[in-house]
Image (cartoon, rainbow, N blue to C red):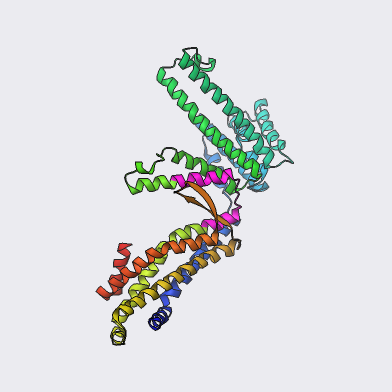
Amino acid sequence: MIKLIYNELYKIFHKKVFYIMLIISFALILGEGYLAKFIKNNMTESTWLLEDRIENVDKTTNEGQTEFADASAQLEVMKLCEKEGTYSLKCAVANDPEAMNPLTQYYLLVAQDKGDSEEAQKARDEFDEVLKKYDGKDFKDFYGDRAKVIKEEIEEAEQMKAAIELAVKSGTALPKEISEIDLSENDIEQMKKDYNNTLETLRMTLEGYEYLRDVNKGNNETNGIIAYYAAAYNTYKDFDPDDSAYKDNDSLTTKRNAEKEYYTYKYMIDNRIVYNDVRANRDQMILPSLSAMNGFVLIFAILLVAGIICDEFNKGTIKQLLIKPFERSKILTSKIIACTLVILLFNLLYYGVVYVAASIPFGFNVDSVLYYSFNTHSVGEMNLLVYMFINTICLIPQLLFYTALCLLFGVLFTNLAISFIGGFAVY
C-alpha cells in the first residue's frame, strides 16, 4: 500500500497543474497587495469633481446656492486634510458638524453675494475658532467634548419623550414645545416612535465618540468601525433573534450575517480594539482570500483527481497497473489517500501563499483575528495562523467527498472534461 501511495504521489508531483495554480494564486494576491499599497500611498480623493460642481452650479436658485455652499465647504476641508494629514486631529475637527456648519453657512452667504457681510465674517470666524480650540490637544479632548454634547442631546430627548408619555397617560397638557401644534393621537404615537429612533441613534453615536476618545486615535479604520457598527445595528435590529423563525436557509443566512457583523463591531468598540491601516489592509486581503479559498482548492481537487484516473486510461497505463499483484480496492484506496494528502498540502501551501503575498507589501506581524460563535452568540480572538489551520481541518470532509466523487466520474467516463464538468456541477 505504501509503495502504491508513493507511486501516486510521484505522478502527482510531476503534474504541472500543481505548480501553475500555486504560482497564479501567489502572483494575483501579491499584485493585489502592491496595488492596494500604491493606491493608499498615491491616490488622494480628487478635488476636480467638486471644483467642477462649484464652477457650473446655478447660484441664482436656492438649490444652486445650497449646492455651491456644500461643495465649497467640502472642498476647503478636503484641501485642509490633504495639507494636515487625512488622519490628523485638525482634519477630524474640520469634518465635525461643529466646524462644518458655520463654514457651510459662510459659503451660502458667499453664494448670495453677501461674502463681505458681518454675518459671513462671523460664520468664518466661528469655523476658525473651532479649529484653534483644539490646537495642542489630542483626539481624547476632541471626542470627549463631542461625547458631552451627545449626552446633553440624549438627556433632552429622554425628557421630551417622558413628558409626552406622561401627558398621554395622565391627560395633562403636552410640553410647550409641541402644545401649540394640532396633533392627532396617531401623530403623538409617531412622535414617540421618532424619539425612540432618535435616542437609538444618539446612543450609538455616543458609543462611537467614547470609543474614539478612549483609543485617542483617528484613522480610516477607527472611523470605519463606527460607521459599520451603526449600519450593522440598523440591519440586525429588524431581524427576529430566534433562528427557528426562519423557514428557508437564505433568510437564516442573511440574519446570521447581520448578527455576526453587529456583534463583531460591538465587541471591537466595547473592548477598544484598534486596527491600524496597514494591518487592516493586510487582513482585508487575507480573510476574504481564505473565504474564496474553498472554491479555489476544490477546483484544483477536481482537476487533480479527475486527471489522475483519466490519464491512466488515456495513456494506457491502467492496464499495466491492473496486472500488478495488487487488489483493485488497494489501488483505488492508494489514489484516494494520495490525492487527499496532496490536496491538504496544496491547501496549506495556498494559505502560506496568501499570508506571504499579503504580508510582503504590509509586513509580517502575526495578529489575532476575531471570530463569532453562533452557539454562544459571542465574539472571541484567535491567532491568525491558528485560524488558518482550523479552516484547513474544517475543509477535510468536503475535500474527501469531492475526491471520491471525482474518482467515480473518472472511472465511469475516462474523460477529463466530462469528469471536471460533472464534479464542478455538483460543487
Q: Residue at x 49, y 41 (%)?
A: 231
Specify the quadrant that holds the N terminus. bottom left
Q: Position of residue 291 (x, y in %)?
A: 45, 58
- Comparing 421 with 266, the one in front is 266
Q: Position of residue 68 (x, y in %)?
A: 55, 36
Is most of the magenta stretch helix, strand or loop? Answer: helix
Q: Residue at x 69, y 35 (%)?
A: 128
Q: Residue at x 49, y 69 (%)?
A: 349
Q: Is residue 385 above or below residue 265?
A: below
Q: Position of residue 172 (x, y in %)?
A: 49, 12
Q: Is residue 80 visible?
A: no
Q: Which residues are magenta?
A: 258-284
Q: Is residue 235 above or below residue 382?
A: above
Specify the quadrant that holds the C terminus. bottom left
Q: Is residue 236 above or below residue 335?
A: above
Q: Residue placed farthest to the top in the image?
A: 172
Q: Residue placed farthest to the right in the image?
A: 136
Is residue 21 within the magenta segment?
no
Q: Is residue 348 visible?
A: yes
Q: Is residue 29 above or below residue 230?
A: below
